[in-house]
Image: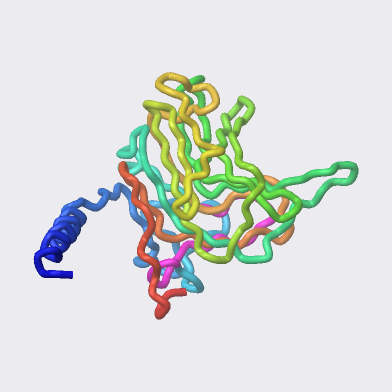
Amino acid sequence: MTTSLLRPALAVLALSVASMAQTPAPKLILSEDFESTAVGQIPAGYTKSGAVAVADDVAHSGKHSLRMEPAQRGPRRITRQGAEIAALGGEHWGRLYYKVKLPTPAPVVPEGKKFAVIHSTLVSGKATSPLSNDPIEVRVLDSVLGPNGTFQYLYNVQPAKRPEFATGSKYLYRYSDEWTLAEWYVDHATQTYRFFINGEEITAIALHKGAGQFTGAEIPAAFESLSFGWNNYQPAGEGFTAWIDDITLSKERIGPLPAPAAAGKK
């Protein structure tokens, strides 16, 4: 290539690099990588339910992650409320990485039945329903494991006194002992929910109801708290062991972290 032809290409490349450099990073409202928390403890500002604590056996980044110990059923999670959660308002992007110890428990099909599941929640928020003005739990990272080892992702809302409702994908997924990137987006103003795994949107559970169309979505105007961990509602034998790392919440999409280097990462 001649010098005269090369100059325009270099100019375009320089402009592209400069443009990328000027793009501001998303402003994080909450970020937790567990590095400053001692092993066996939970981060300051959170409360805990069940057997959950920071561990140094595996990590997506750094040396620490949040480990959920196995239990037959019930929550093993940490919960945050306060200024950061209030700052989210009715719209936010969330991101975390999770992994699960294999093999996982399998649902036990009761005698006389043909199907059984284990419903597990990894991220949920307490709020007030914009439809019925009653307490609800909004489960933005949720799964249901079937008897053949596959599970579905779903968006699930559990009112305190009304029946729950959900929209779920097909049973296409398997828990992995590799780190999985999960992202979600909620918007009260448009009653929108979006969900991504490893950067790919799972459109089967997306919601785009529209302003004021609360039925079947009930995305709240504000969250009172958000919980991160594991909570399964049906018996799971010896239970799930799982890890979460690099939780972030923002008004903008955060995207993935750079892939961890081989040395010093577990």
Give the quadrant of residue 72: bottom right
Q: Is residue 153 above or below residue 71?
A: above
Q: Residue at x 53, y 22 (%)?
A: 215
User: What is the image's colouring?
Assistant: rainbow
Quadrant where the image shows the N terminus = bottom left
Q: Which residues are magenta?
A: 60-77
Measured as percent of width and height from the top left, residue 134 is found at 51, 24
**Residue placed furthest toward the bottom:** 263
Q: Is residue 64 magenta?
A: yes
Q: Is residue 107 above or below residue 163?
A: below
Where residue 95 appears, as percent x and y from the top left, is 41, 51
**Quarter of image, res 93:** top left
Q: Residue furthest front?
A: 2
In reply to whether residue 198 is colored magenta, the answer given is: no
Of 38 and 55, the residue lying toward us: 55
- Residue 248, percent from left and from top: 37, 52
Q: What count of labels does the image hold?
A: 0
Q: Residue at position x 84%, y 46% from top?
A: 110
Could you say which is closer to the camera, residue 193 or residue 70? 193
**Residue 170 versus residue 157: which sits nearer the camera?**
170
Q: Is residue 239 above or below residue 266?
A: above
Left or right position of 179 against 256: right
Residue at the spot x=14%, y=66% of the render?
A: 6
Residue drawn 86% across and 42% down?
113
Give the camera-side residue of 89 and 173: 173
Provide residue 3's location: percent of width, then percent of height: 10, 69
